[in-house]
Image (cartoon, rainbow, N blue to C red):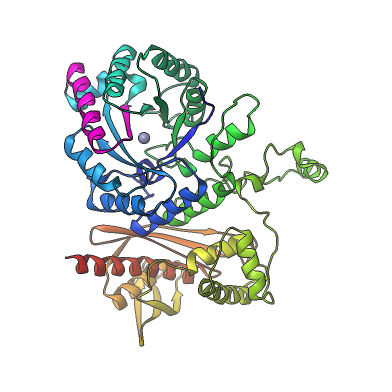
Amino acid sequence: MSDRVYIFDTTLRDGEQSPGCSMNLEEKLKMARKLDLLNVDIIEAGFPIASEGDFEAVRMVAAEVENCTIAGLARAHKLDIERAAEAVKGARKPRIHTFIATSDIHLEHKLRKSRAEVLKQSAEAVKIARDLCDDVEFSAEDATRSDIGYLVEVFEAAIEQGARTINIPDTVGYALPQEFGPFVNEIISRISNKEGVVFSCHCHNDLGLGVANSLAGVENGCRQVECTINGIGERAGNAALEEIVMALRTRKDRMPYHTEVVTEEIYPASRMLTNLTGAYVQANKAIVGKNAFAHEAGIHQDGMLKKAITYEIMTPQSVGIVSSTLVLGKHSGRHALHNKFEELGYALDKEELNRAYFFFTKLADQKKEVYDEDLIAIIQDGIKLIPDTWSLKYVHSAGGNQELSTAVVKLQRGEEIRTESAFGDGPVDACCKAIDALTGQSGRLLEYSVSSVSRGKDALGEAFVHVQFNDRTYTGKAASVDVIDASARAYLNAVNKAIHEQKRLKEEA
Ligand SMILES: [Zn+2]
């Protein structure tokens, strides 16, 4: 058996459907391009039948991504499968991923079908899919709570109809590594027609064992692992891509398998996902957490200075973290900025560099030390995919712990400049109300967070919002040394996205 492990990334499907991780079309495309650079093998881009937006996102990702296989998810129904086929057909390497539950618990309570019916439906679904696409994956939902003999039967039927990848999910995150490994092993050894089939695992993290179970799967014959950036996903999430890839790489001595992932893109991909969704990664998260490579204790620092290997099992550079030191100040020129961005993994064209430089000089005026994190925030905030219908010219907000807060906001649209004041519960709420009055939108702030993206008292604060306009939710983000300024601009960012989307929908209608 080959030692090559295929990485199936489902950040845009299983990850995206989890609370607080939704992305719009542009954001999904941006993430997909990053996954392509990361060189994952398969991108599961969405669940096309779920909504028009999902369908469109899968179609666009399929059309745009160059290297990866693009998968669309479908239940084991004809309509689902046809919709998925339609969505992925523009991909260079399309895949249909169809699934049905096989555990008695799901059969009885969810599907209300007999084992024989589900067996038949599985085979039919794969057959329909194979008529539309050469590359078909079949998953048995809740496999770990299914009867193993029945599971083998279902998998054999799916393979018989042409499924090339057989996925064994621990849907509810219940399995233990010492049971999941032998479980996978037994399934594979009992399947009679496994020639040329790739076995896969998809492990959820409800007991914090998603990665451990996935590695047990690999050791027992799985050569595809389904995972997500930062481990996002339903409930406690999926197995984290970065942990699987780095565990395989770092412990090659015990696990002689390899992936083709460009590990230096791991941290940039993690940052991008956080920036797009606002779903922050815990500081002590393995590989990509803020503290994952920080050595705080004196004795550790001493050891690190003498020789990094004393406390470091892998280097931050290997996952794309550039050492964060004081870099640029207000006297740094465009050239230095360009080089620094290049080092951070962002190749800017002339116009982008000009915009970035403009933000950089503004920031360098406000704070003495500009860190790498500040620069990344600039680039992700300053160079936008969505045109700014409205831009913020001025904001002043006053609050306290007694009365209502007030805000005065001045916005510009083209040549037009308008000012409005408003009251609110707190200065941020007052700003949002003034912005609503100026832009004619009516947003409902669902989530709001401010975090510091660099160090020191003059650190850059990054505000993140989830705002609902009518039935749709938009994220907004902005960074500034002033929290009110960042909050107002983050809110306005969401307003501009909503306006852009409303225009697009109107044009389509
Ligand atoms: Zn899942």
Up-down: is 122 above or below 508?
A: above
Q: Where ligand 1 lies, by image quadrant? A: top left
Name the chief secondary structure element in magenta. Answer: helix
Q: Position of residue 159 (x, y in %)?
A: 31, 23
Say which of 247 and 34 sits in front.
Answer: 34
Please report the residue visible at 34 percent of the width from the left and 66 percent of the height from the top: 497
- Quadrant in which the C terminus appears: bottom left
Please report the residue visible at 44 percent of the width from the left and 71 percent of the height from the top: 399
Q: Position of residue 416 (x, y in %)?
A: 34, 87
Up-down: is 250 above or below 486?
A: above
Residue 372 at least partly seen: yes
The residue range painted magenta reads: 114-140
Up-down: is 507 above or below 133?
A: below
Residue 426 at least partly seen: no
Does the stretch in magenta take in 118?
Answer: yes
- State which quadrant residue 334 falls in: bottom right
Say which of 408 and 356 sits in front.
Answer: 356
Please report the residue visible at 28 percent of the width from the left and 38 percent of the height from the top: 133
Q: Is residue 507 left or right of residue 186?
A: left
Image label count: 0
Say which of 63 and 496 sits in front.
Answer: 63
Does the stretch in magenta take in 1?
Answer: no
- State which quadrant residue 138 falls in: top left
Say which of 216 and 417 sits in front.
Answer: 216
Q: Position of residue 330 (x, y in %)?
A: 67, 76
Up-down: is 482 above or below 63?
A: below
Q: Position of residue 418 (x, y in %)?
A: 35, 85
Please report the residue visible at 52 percent of the width from the left and 22 percent of the height from the top: 219
Q: Is residue 508 left or right of residue 478?
A: left
